[in-house]
Amino acid sequence: MFKNWFKKLKQNNFLGLDIGTSSIKIVELSYRGGRCFLVNYGWADVSGFQLQQSDSARFFSAKNEIRDITEKLLKKMHPKSKSVYVSIAGYNGLLALVDMPNVKDEDLEESVKFEAVKYIPSSLDEVFISWDVVFRQPLESDILEDINLKNDEQKKAKNTMEILLAAVPKQEVFKMENIVKNLGLEVEAMELENFSLARSLVKNDLGTFIIVDIGSRLVNVILVQKGVIKASRSLNTGGYEITSAIAEGMKISKTKAESMKKQKGDFFLSSESLIVIPTLEMIIEEVKRMINIFKAKNAGASINSIILSGGGIKMKGLDRFLSNSLGLRVEVVDPFSGIQYDESLSPYIKEIGPSFAVAVGLALRGVEEYQRK
């Protein structure tokens, strides 16, 4: 994504930087001998800013403080790579699966821009756009078409193609680029965090999954089929709102409510389970809506599982609660799976894994690009 924003790789160390609204995560991976290794990782808490800032604009107004915190973290890590893969929050961008006329390669860019106007509410001059071709029939001669295409449906399939369109406001890209430059690093590539999540959690699995990534202030719901994002929605709510709902329902402090979320017992089997948590209701309704639309377009299709991710999933029993509510298998997938690291780190990696899915996915993009060279 954003093809003009990365340069050719000159090394096999890859740095992923995820600046969230409550924490900063950094992962460095290396690729050698056909295997991927965890070189380094780091985490810094910026929840103090999150509690004071009500939206992304105000959050980034504290960019000097964010820069200082990230700079200290990098000094402790001493990463080998000075170029970095960076995420942009899902709510700052747009993802759309677009059906459009099948055209020749030389006409594709102009055709995509023509279609993009229908989906992007602002001027194309104000956004960076990128696209991937999801499905496309090869263009053939009219003679072959008459021979091979027996009905209208086949002809329609031949004359259309499917692309995944992504768009991000230029101002958001420039903000992030400025932060990275002030850290003394170079932007290797930027992408919406939705792509990073799919890369680290689904990997090469060809099934159909729905990722539910619960962050501090944002929930991403992403449907991935055969490794391709087919639907994506960002909900303006998250772990902070879950904590607030528990605090208000039980008449306790948010600090105590946060502690209760992470208690050893199953939260949803306790008396507190009677508390209405709007964030969870929103997630359930959005997942159901996404599944219904997907099945309406794909007769006989099914969902393999719901994948939970993000720092907001640390509620004992959440997976079982969502499974019972949705009638589907719910699992927590380790984004570090398939990556080599010291066995002594296993307990800690297992604990932090869900929070590092975006950072791992960003670094894995570097590995993928290196493998293709």
Image (tube, rainbow, N blue to C red):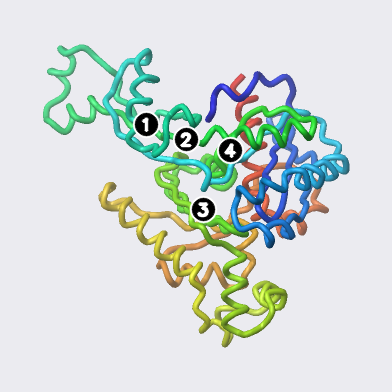
Residue nearer the viewer, 371 or 76: 76
**Circle 1 or circle 4, nearest the eye:** 4
Residue nearer the viewer, 37 or 96: 96
Tag 1: residue type?
Ala
Tag 4: residue type?
Glu
| Mark number, residue 116 | 1
Gap in Å between the C-alphas at discs 2 and 3?
Answer: 16 Å
Q: Residue at x 19, y 30 (%)?
A: 156
Q: Position of residue 245 (x, y in %)?
A: 57, 75
Mark earlier in primary sequence (1, 2): 1
Residue nearer the viewer, 327 or 244: 244
Q: Residue at x 16, y 24 (%)?
A: 149
Task: State left or right for residue 85 relative to residue 44.
Answer: left
| Mark number, residue 24 | none
Gap in Å between the C-alphas at discs 1 and 3?
Answer: 22 Å
Tag 3: residue type?
Asn
Tag 2: residue type?
Ala
Gap in Å between the C-alphas at discs 4 and 2?
Answer: 11 Å
Gap in Å between the C-alphas at discs 3 and 4?
Answer: 18 Å
Residue named by callout 3:
220
Residue named by callout 2:
167
